[in-house]
C-alpha cells in the first residue's frame, strides 16, 4: 500500500489544480490494485483529512472520476471502484492511446494485419470506390495496462493517406496518424451489440458468449470517404460515451 501523500506539497515541480492531484492519487491507487474493483474507497471526510484539502476539492475529484467511469457513487452507501469499464469518446475522433493515457493507463498495441487489398463490393460501396480498387487494410488490437480493450479493423482510402502502410503502428495509432496527415471533415458512427466470432474472442481474450460493443465508423476528408472502420470492445470492460453541446445560436435540445 502506498503512503498517504500531502496533496498540497506533492509534485511542486509540476503545478496542477488540487482536484486534479486528488484525481491522480485515487487513480494511482486503483491502477496499482490497492483499491480493487467493487471496493469501497474512503469517505469524503476521510479523504479531506488524509489528503489535507477541502471537501469541495475532494467532491469535484470524485464527481469527475465517476463521470469518467472509475467510480460508482451510491447515495447513503458510499463510493466504490467501478467494475473496470473505462469510457472512450463517441462523438469525437480520437486516438485510443490518448484516451488510455488520459485515464492514467499504459497503451500498447499489436499489429496483426497491414496490407493493400482490392476492395470487395461491400467495402467499395461503403467508400464510394469502384469494386476492385486498391485499399489499405489494418487489423490492430489495442490494450490498456496489458489487457485488450479494442479490436480495430480499418480500411483506408490510399488517396487521402498514401504513406499509411509505411507507418509503425506499434508506436503511433492509425487514428493519430490520420488526424495528423489529413483533414477529417465529417464522421458517421453506428453502434451495435454483437457476439463476436472466434477470432475476435481470442484476440480480445474474452469468453464465448460475451457480448461486445461495436462502433462502425466512416470518415470523410472533404467529399472523399477516407476510412471505413469497425471497432470491437469487450462489453464487460469497456463503454462508449460522449457529450454534446449545441452552438450558442441553436435551439435547446429536447429529449
Image (cartoon, rainbow, N blue to C red):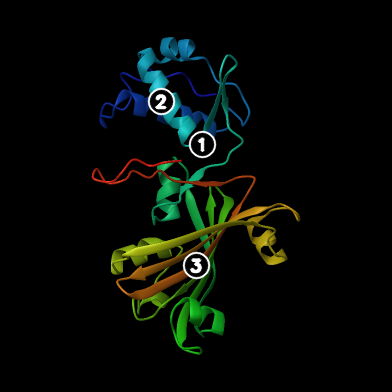
Q: Are marks 1 and 2 in contact (CB under 8 Å)?
A: no
Residue shown at 47%/14% (left/top)?
A: 44
Crowd tier of the residue under label 1, counting other residues whose Cα lies within 10 Å: few below 14, some 14–19, many 20 or above: some
Task: Work out whether residue 255 or residue 141 is closer to the camera in this orientation and state it.
Answer: 255
Q: Earlier in the sequence, mark 1 or mark 2?
A: 2
Q: Which residue is mark 2?
A: 61
Query: Is residue 219 or residue 142 the one in the foreground?
Result: 219
Rounded to the nearest angstrom, the CA distance separating label 1 from label 2 is: 12 Å
- Residue topped by disc 3: 229
Which picture quadrant has residue 58? top left
Where in the figure is residue 142, as x and y percent of width and height? 52, 57
Q: Secondary structure at mark 1?
A: loop
Q: Is residue 244 left or right of residue 211?
A: left
Q: Which residue is mark 1?
A: 69
**Residue 253 location in percent, x, y?**
38, 42
Q: Position of residue 190 (x, y in %)?
A: 52, 60
Residue 165 image offset from top left, x and y in percent: 42, 77
Q: How far is mark 2 from mark 3, CA to CA?
A: 35 Å
Q: Is 217 in front, or is 29?
A: 217
Which of the two labelled residues, at mark 2 and mark 3, occupies the earlier sequence position? 2
Please say whether residue 180 is visible from this viewpoint.
Answer: yes
Q: Above or below — where is 26 with respect to 51?
A: below
Q: Are marks 3 and 1 in contact (CB under 8 Å)?
A: no
Badge number at residue 119? none
Is 149 placed above or below 161 here? above
Q: CA distance from mark 3 to mark 1?
A: 25 Å
Question: Which of the two marks, 2 or 3, is nearer to us in this view?
Answer: 3
Q: Residue at x 29, y 69 (%)?
A: 181
Mark 2 is surrounded, within 10 Å at the Cα level, by few (under 14), some (14 to 19) or many (20 or more) other residues, namely: many
Q: Quick one: SS at disc 2?
A: helix
In the image shown, does 126 or 56 lie closer to the viewer?
126
Image quadrant in which you'd find residue 102: top left
Amino acid at each position: 500500500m502506498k503512503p498517504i501523500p500531502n496533496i498540497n506539497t506533492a509534485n511542486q515541480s509540476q503545478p496542477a489544480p488540487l482536484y486534479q492531484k486528488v484525481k491522480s492519487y485515487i487513480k494511482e491507487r486503483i491502477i496499482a490494485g490497492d483499491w480493487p474493483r467493487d471496493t469501497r474507497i474512503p469517505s469524503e471526510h476521510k479523504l479531506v483529512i488524509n489528503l489535507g484539502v477541502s471537501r469541495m476539492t475532494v467532491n469535484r475529484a470524485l464527481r469527475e472520476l465517476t463521470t469518467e467511469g472509475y467510480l460508482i457513487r451510491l447515495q447513503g452507501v458510499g463510493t466504490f471502484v467501478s467494475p473496470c469499464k473505462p469510457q472512450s469518446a463517441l462523438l469525437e475522433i480520437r486516438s485510443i492511446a490518448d484516451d488510455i493515457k488520459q485515464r492514467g493507463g499504459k497503451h500498447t498495441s499489436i499489429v496483426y494485419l497491414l496490407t493493400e487489398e482490392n476492395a470487395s463490393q461491400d467495402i467499395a460501396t461503403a467508400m464510394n470506390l469502384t469494386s476492385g480498387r486498391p485499399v489499405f487494410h489494418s487489423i490492430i488490437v489495442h490494450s490498456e495496462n496489458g489487457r485488450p480493450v479494442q479490436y480495430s479493423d480499418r480500411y483506408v482510402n490510399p488517396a487521402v493517406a498514401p504513406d499509411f502502410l509505411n507507418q509503425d503502428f506499434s508506436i503511433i495509432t492509425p487514428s493519430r496518424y490520420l488526424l495528423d496527415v489529413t483533414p477529417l471533415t465529417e464522421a458517421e458512427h453506428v453502434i451495435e451489440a454483437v457476439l463476436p466470432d472466434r477470432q475476435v474472442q481470442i484476440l480480445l481474450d474474452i469468453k464465448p458468449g460475451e457480448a461486445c460493443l461495436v462502433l462502425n465508423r466512416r470518415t470523410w476528408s472533404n467529399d472523399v470517404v477516407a476510412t471505413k472502420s469497425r471497432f470491437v470492445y469487450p462489453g464487460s470492460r469497456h463503454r462508449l460515451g460522449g457529450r454534446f453541446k449545441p452552438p450558442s445560436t441553436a435551439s435547446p435540445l429536447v429529449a
